[in-house]
Amino acid sequence: MKEKLQKLNDQAYWLEFTWNHDHDCADGIYHAPTYSFKFKDPAIQKTTWTVIRPSHLKVLRNDSGLSAADVKNLIIVDWFEQENLVRRHHNNLKAQERRAKRKLEVN
C-alpha cells in the first residue's frame, strides 16, 4: 500500500469549479490522476475553520486500486493535512480562551 501511496503522491493535482444552483455557490471538483472527489456539502468549502474529515468527502472516481476509505484518507493527507493542522490549532486556542473566560465568569 505504501508503494501505491508514493506513486499517487508524485502526480499532478488540479481543481475545477462548477456552479451549484441548489446551494447558490461554486462546487469544487478536485482531481488527481487516479481519483476525483468533491465535498458532500458544498457549504464546507465556504467555512474557514472546519477540520476536513473523510466523512465530508464524496469520491467521484477511483482508479487507484485502493478502497474508498483508503482513498478518502489519502485525500485528507494529500489535500488538507497542513490546513487541518492550522485549523485544529486555531480551534484549540479558541476553545482554551472560551474555557478561561467561563472560568473567570464563574469565579
Image (cartoon, rainbow, N blue to C red):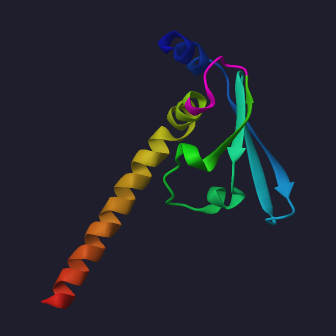
Quadrant position of residue 36: top right
Report the side of 105 relative to 23 (left or right). Answer: left
Residue shown at the point (84%, 64%) measured from the top left: 22
- Magenta residues, dominant SS class: loop
Which residues lie in the magenta part? 63-69
Which residue of the protein is positioned furthest toward the top in this rendering?
3
The residue closer to the viewer here, 22 or 65, is 65
Q: Position of residue 25 (x, y in %)?
A: 78, 62
Give the residue at the far left of this rendering: 107
Where residue 70 appears, as percent x and y from the top left, is 55, 28
Asked if residue 31 shows in the view, the reply is: no
Instruction: Identify whether 58 is placed above or below 10.
Output: below
Could you tell whether 101 is left or right of 33 in the image?
left
Q: Quadrant of the C terminus?
A: bottom left
| Relative image position of residue 96 (x, y in whole percent) | 26, 68
| Residue 35 visible in this rendered orientation of the protein | yes
Residue at 50% from the left image edge and 33% from the top image edge: 77
Which quadrant of the view contains residue 20? bottom right
* Residue at position x 68%, y 29% in the image: 13
Residue 37 in percent (x, y) is at 70, 38
Which residue is located at x 17 percent, y 89 percent? 106
Q: How many marks?
A: 0
